[in-house]
Image (cartoon, grey):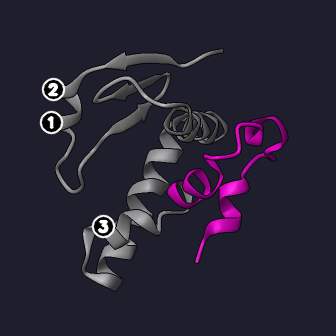
Amino acid sequence: MFPIIIVSPKFTKLMSIFIDVYAITIFPFIISKEKMDKVTLNHEKIHIQQQKEMLVIFFYLFYAYFFVRNYLIYKDTHVAYMLIPFEKEARLNHNNQNYLEKRQFYSWINYIE
């Protein structure tokens, strides 16, 4: 299944509550501020895989947990976001266009601090 890609600057601006959102993945949609380059698209596709393997709802629950936990520790929304294991996995592998072909289930666990 391919993600459904939507370009919506208004939606991404609306979602920019804590951090500036360029693109956001809400399974099965990838919504971006403008047309994405292949690196950004790959980053968001990694999130699609994470969401699928966690039955979507558990991804969001864990995502919120890690964000709040990190914010309570570091008192900085950007740091809290950057340390979310889902984001770390996507960020550290988004340049590898073959990553999803070899990625193992629950690889995000390797990025928990």
Q: Earlier in the sequence, mark 1 or mark 3?
A: 1
Would you call the spot at circle 2 few (<14 residues within 10 Å), some (14-19), or many (20 or more)? few
Which quadrant of the structure image shows residue 73? bottom left
**Is 102 included in the stretch rendered in magenta?**
yes
Left or right of 28 in this view: 2: right
* Residue 74 point in image, percent of width and height: 32, 83
Amino acid type shown at disc 3: His
Question: Circle 2 sits on which residue?
Answer: 10
Magenta stretch contains residue 69: no
**Side of 77 where 56 appears, left or right:** right
Q: Residue furthest right?
A: 102
Residue 15: horizontal and vertical position, in percent?
21, 40
Spatial CA span between label 2 and label 3: 21 Å
Could you say which is closer to the camera, residue 36 or residue 84?
36
Kindly identify which residue carries mark 3: 78
Q: Earlier in the sequence, mark 2 or mark 3?
A: 2
Q: Which residues are magenta?
A: 87-113
- How far apart in space, not on screen, are marks 1 and 3 (Cα)? 17 Å
Give the image quarter of residue 31: top left
Kindly identify the amino acid type of the residue bearing the numbered disc 2: Lys
Asked if 98 appears above or below 27 in the picture, the reply is below
Give the amino acid at mark 1. Answer: Leu
Question: Mark 1 sits on what residue?
Answer: 14
Residue lying at 61% horizontally and 42% vertically, measured from the top left: 50
Q: Secondary structure at mark 3?
A: helix
